[in-house]
Structures are given as C-alpha cells and as structure tokens.
Amino acid sequence: MKNMHMVLTVCMALAVMATGCVNHESGQAADPAAAVVRPANPAVKKCLEDGYVVEPVMENGVPVDHRCINPETGKACGVWEYYRDTCMLE
C-alpha cells in the first residue's frame, strides 16, 4: 500500500510538471524556439525616446491602446497621434 501511494504521488507530480510544457490553446507541446517575437510599437518607442511616459488605455480591464503623457504638464495624447505629430505634448 505504501508503494502504491508513492507511485501515485510521483505520477501526480509528473502530470503537474508536464502541464507547463503544453500550449494550452492548441494542446500541443510548446516549442520555445518557435516563440513569436513582436517588433516594438514604433509609436510607443518614439514617446519613450522623447522622454515621455506611456500609459495603457483600458476598456473593461483590457489594454486596448496607449497614451503618451508629458510628466511635467500632465498633457496626454494617443501614442499614434503623437507619432504622427497631430498632437503636441509641450
């Protein structure tokens, strides 16, 4: 009985560890080499490089866009408006 308990414990531990190696959307094993690398958002990058702060715009708890904010004045624009020079933060 003691051996059966140990076998079950080991099996459960292996099952728990194996769940970290599965892509839960497709059910297939995850391949770290196939990870998709997304390029940086150029609008967010410009905002940060120019010394401003980026803040997510949330809808129902989900980020849907970003705002570029001048921390000194509090003035804000959508990052793409700032990127296209249709909104100034100074």
Image (cartoon, rainbow, N blue to C red):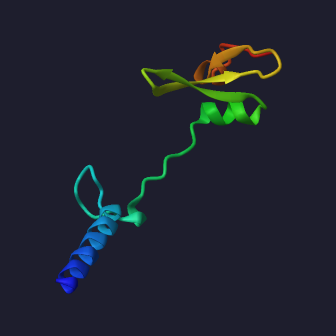
Image position, residue 81 (x, y; %) = 61, 18
Residue at left offset 50%, top offset 22%: 58
Name the residue at the front extreme: 1
| Residue at figure coordinates x 30%, y 68% from the top left | 18
Q: How many marks?
A: 0
In this view, which residue lies farthest toward the bottom?
3
Q: Quadrant of the C terminus?
A: top right
Residue at image point 23% right, 53% down: 26
Image quarter in which the N terminus is found:
bottom left
| Nearest to the observer: residue 49 or residue 73 | 73
Residue 74 on image: x %, y %: 75, 15
Residue in the picture at 81% in, 15% down:
73
Task: Report the front residue among 47 and 2.
Answer: 2
Of residue 41 and residue 70, the one placed in the foreground of this image is 70
* Residue 38 placement, left or right of 13: right
Left or right of 44? Residue 35 is left
Name the one closer to the observer, 2 or 49.
2
